[in-house]
C-alpha cells in the first residue's frame, strides 16, 4: 500500500473552490418551514413571529385620552394582525425583520388606524354636508307658492 503525499499548494488549489461553493450555499432556517394550503404557501414560523410582534407591542403603545373601549381595542388589534400577516405572506421577510416590523405596526399602527378613522369620518361628514338636499315642505307652502305665481 503506497501513500500519496500532496504539497500544500496542490491541496489548497483543489479544495479552495469547494470551500467557496460550500460557504455560499443557503442554510436552513425556521422561516423555511412552509405549509401549502389553498394554493398559498404559509410560512408558519414567520407568521407566528409577526403575530407575537403585533400582540407584544400593544402594552407599549401610547395610551389614548380617553382610552378606547375593549371592543375597539380588539378591532384595532385584529386589523393590525391581518395587515402584518398579509405582509408576511406576500413579501416573505426574514424572521428578525418580520418581528421588528410587526412591533412597529403594533406600536404605531394603532395611532395610524385611529387617525385614519378620524379622517374618514371627517371626510364623510363634509361630503354629506356638501350634498344638495331637496327642500321638504308641507302641502300648504306649495299652494301659497302657486298663488304668488
Image (cartoon, rainbow, N blue to C red):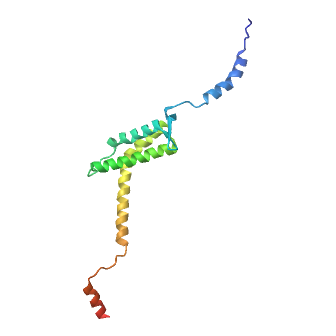
Where is residue 101 shown, x and y percent of the image?
44, 42
Where is residue 119 shown, x and y percent of the image?
37, 60
Q: Quadrant of the N terminus?
A: top right
Q: Quadrant of residue 118?
A: bottom left
| Left or right, residue 28 beside residue 64 | right
Q: Residue at x 67, y 25 (%)?
A: 18
Q: Nearer the viewer, residue 93 or 141?
A: 141
Q: Residue at x 49, y 40 (%)?
A: 42
Q: Quadrant of the C terminus?
A: bottom left
Where is residue 27 shown, x and y percent of the image?
56, 30
| Left or right, residue 33 beside residue 128 | right
Q: Residue at x 25, y 86 (%)?
A: 140
- Residue placed farthest to the front in the image? 38
Q: Nearer the viewer, residue 118 or 44?
A: 44
Q: Is residue 136 above or below residue 20?
A: below
Q: Quadrant of residue 100?
A: top left
| Left or right, residue 83 beside residue 7 | left
Q: Nearer the viewer, residue 108 or 36?
A: 36
Where is residue 147 shown, x and y percent of the image?
29, 93
Amino acid at each position: 500500500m503506497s501513500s500519496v503525499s500532496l504539497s500544500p499548494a496542490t491541496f489548497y488549489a483543489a479544495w479552495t473552490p469547494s470551500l467557496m461553493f460550500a460557504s455560499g450555499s443557503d442554510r436552513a432556517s425556521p422561516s423555511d418551514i412552509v405549509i401549502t394550503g389553498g394554493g398559498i404557501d404559509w410560512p408558519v414560523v414567520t407568521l407566528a413571529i409577526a403575530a407575537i410582534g403585533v400582540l407584544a407591542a400593544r402594552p407599549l403603545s401610547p395610551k389614548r385620552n380617553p382610552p378606547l373601549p375593549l371592543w375597539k381595542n380588539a378591532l384595532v388589534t385584529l386589523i393590525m394582525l391581518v395587515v402584518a400577516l398579509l405582509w408576511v405572506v406576500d413579501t416573505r421577510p426574514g424572521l428578525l425583520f418580520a418581528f421588528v416590523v410587526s412591533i412597529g405596526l403594533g406600536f404605531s399602527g394603532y395611532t395610524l388606524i385611529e387617525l385614519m378613522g378620524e379622517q374618514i369620518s371627517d371626510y364623510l361628514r363634509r361630503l354629506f354636508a356638501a350634498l344638495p338636499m331637496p327642500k321638504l315642505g308641507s302641502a300648504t307652502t306649495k299652494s301659497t307658492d302657486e298663488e304668488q305665481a
